[in-house]
């Protein structure tokens, strides 16, 4: 080979080397641009995810506060019912006392054939006991009505709480729509 051939070969090799180098540089710059775009897209996705998580956290906080308020109402109603049950138990003890008194007086009826005067006195006492029992039963009726009203209030509160939970479920579905739209826009495996 002559010097001219060698110089020609060197020139060709240098041109090929420059083309390869510029192609390599173009590939590297393309990869850097793609990585920058993917990084920006990832940042937007992370920001959207953080926003959605914030909305979900606020929704859960509202749900917890609502449930806490409902539990406090139910607790108050149950405490009220407890007081009524205590008074009903007291009235039942009075009724038992009157029933025991009536049993004792009824045992004396076997001797009433000979003692009609004693019988009249005992009948009057029984009448008085019956009046007291009537008043006691009226008190129990009053307490039972109060308990019924409390149970009705509790049922209403539970219905209200159920409606709130259903509303929150609908709101959660509504709020999750943007997240599903973001997932469709940025499908990552």
Image (cartoon, rainbow, N blue to C red):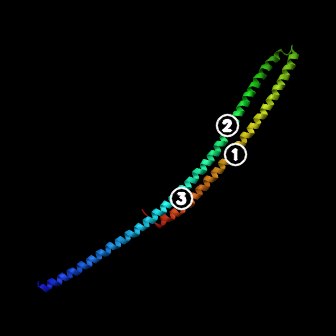
Cβ–Cβ under 8 Å for marks 3 and 2: no
Local secondary structure at mark 2: helix
Of pointers 1 and 3, the one earlier in the residue sequence: 3
Counting from the top left corner in percent of width and height, residue 125 is at 83, 22
Cβ–Cβ under 8 Å for marks 1 and 3: no
Counting from the top left corner in percent of width and height, residue 166 is at 61, 54
Cβ–Cβ under 8 Å for marks 1 and 2: no
Which residue in the structure is indicated by mark 2? 82
Local secondary structure at mark 1: helix
Image height of 151 relative to 33, above or below? above
Q: Nearer the viewer, residue 81 or 105?
A: 81
Give the spatial CA distance, label 3 vs label 2: 40 Å
Image height of 63 relative to 148, above or below? below
Q: Quadrant of residue 149?
A: top right
Counting from the top left corner in percent of width and height, residue 99 is at 76, 25
Residue at image position (65%, 47%) is 158
Residue at image position (58%, 54%) is 62
Image height of 110 relative to 1, above or below? above
Q: Quadrant of the N terminus?
A: bottom left
Which residue in the structure is indicated by mark 3? 55
Which residue in the structure is indicated by mark 1? 153
């Amino acid at each position: 080979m002559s010097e001219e051939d060698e110089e020609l070969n060197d020139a060709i090799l240098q041109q090929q080397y420059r083309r390869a180098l510029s192609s390599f540089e173009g590939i590297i710059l393309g990869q850097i641009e793609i990585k920058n775009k993917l990084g920006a897209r990832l940042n937007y996705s992370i920001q959207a995810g953080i926003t959605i998580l914030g909305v979900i956290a606020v929704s859960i906080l509202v749900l917890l506060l609502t449930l806490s308020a409902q539990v406090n109402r139910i607790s108050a109603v149950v405490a009220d019912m407890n007081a009524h049950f205590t008074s009903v138990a007291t009235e039942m003890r009075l009724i038992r006392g009157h029933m025991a008194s009536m049993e004792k007086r009824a045992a004396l009826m076997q001797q009433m054939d000979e003692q009609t005067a004693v019988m009249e006195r005992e009948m009057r006492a029984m009448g008085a006991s019956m009046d007291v029992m009537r008043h006691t039963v009226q008190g129990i009726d009053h307490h039972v009505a109060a308990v019924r009203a409390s149970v009705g209030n509790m049922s209403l509160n539970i219905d209200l709480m159920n409606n709130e939970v259903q509303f929150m479920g609908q709101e959660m579905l509504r709020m999750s729509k943007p997240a599903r739209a973001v997932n469709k826009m940025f499908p990552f495996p």
